[in-house]
Amino acid sequence: MPAMVLSRPGPIETGPLRLEDRPDHPPGPGELLLEVAACGVCRTDLQLAEGDLEARRLPIVLGHQVVGRVAAIGPGVEGWAQGDRAGVGWLGGCCGECERCLEGRENLCPAARFTGWDADGGYATRMAAPAAFALRLPDRFPDLAAAPLLCGGVIGYRALRVSGIRPGERLGLYGFGASALLAIQVAVHWGCEVFVATRSAAEQQRALDMGAVWAGGYDDPPPAPLDAAVTFAPAGEVVVAALRALDRGGVLAVNAIHLDRIPEFPYQLLWWERQIRSVANFTRRDAAEFLDLAARLPLHTVAEAFPLDEANTALARLKRGEVSGAAVLVTH
């Protein structure tokens, strides 16, 4: 099967992902074999490809926003049939027995495994995935539109929950890429006043068109103090900018697996019981809640398709900020 394989990280401009023909393997116990139709391209993939985020194994197939059809079913799998459509996200396994798993916080399990980091992901025409972590996808979203829901959508939803934002409150979104494009739709549906900070004038206008009450640059103070904020940009200085905009008792959720160094800032910005919380992965419950909500609203996703063998190009364009919405690899 064709797959884009990362064997040695390097600048994305040098093409570190190489197209290889890999042997097909039947699904193992508890696994589904998926015929991949689409796989979203994520900034985490870029960080792995370039070595900013250390790979846990090499070589590896990246990709954790996978949409496909069940081609084969491994021993012991129930509830799935050949031809079913399935999604695969970032969380690809947990122990199910530790304190965090039993509390419903499987995203924090010390033995958690992640798609495209611990196990091969969806930058391929086929992939195996644990059936217990495969996701049912709403029929109303075609494959290209469904892929961005599986990372940017779900993790953005979790970030909103981590921020503690409530209907009617003032929410700041710092960065306005694929994840924030979905998060703003949820926040507006909840009745929040949304303030968006992003460098791009075009993205500022898009935010206003999508229901934001204000949009400006990272260094521009919002016209009102924020009850909560979420940072999507992987830059430490954006964390400080968002913290500066918080009201007393406000919460900042940092939605990043890898972040540049946070600059030194005065304690006064954190005082008055302001809080900074990181957002780590998501749970299957998060995914189920979000996908149900996405279908009911319905959410609108913006995706640009790239052939599988142009994964390096898609990642390079993502790096340069040239993708409007989400980049998605397609196999047909």
Image (cartoon, rainbow, N blue to C red):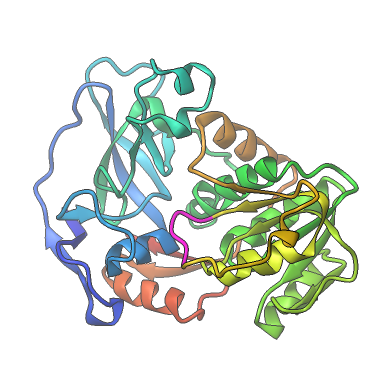
Q: Is residue 158 left or right of residue 58?
A: right
x and y, in percent, of residue 43 in the image: 44, 64
x and y, in percent, of residue 14 in the image: 22, 81
Determine the residue positioned at 27% across, 77% down: 11
Was residue 174 drawn as part of the magenta stretch in this picture? no
Q: Is residue 63 left or right of residue 172?
A: left
Is 72 or 104 nearer to us in this picture? 104
Is any atom of residue 135 visible in this view?
Answer: no
Determine the residue positioned at 56% across, 54% down: 255
Was residue 257 drawn as part of the magenta stretch in this picture? yes
View extreme (front): residue: 267
Vertical arrangement, residue 331 with respect to residue 203, above or below: above
View extreme (bottom): residue: 201
Q: Is residue 16 left or right of residue 330?
A: left
x and y, in percent, of residue 45 in the image: 36, 61
Determine the residue positioned at 34% across, 54% down: 63
Q: Is residue 51 left or right of residue 303?
A: left
Residue 52: quadrant of the picture = bottom left
- The magenta-colored residue range is 256-260
Q: Which quarter of the rendering shows the C terminus?
A: bottom left
Is any atom of residue 214 visible in this view?
Answer: yes
Is 4 or 184 nearer to us in this picture? 184
Vertical arrangement, residue 28 with respect to residue 208, above or below: above
Number of numbered discs visible in the structure rendering: 0
Vertical arrangement, residue 254 with respect to residue 128, above or below: below
Secondary structure mostly seen in the magenta stretch: loop
x and y, in percent, of residue 264 in the image: 58, 68
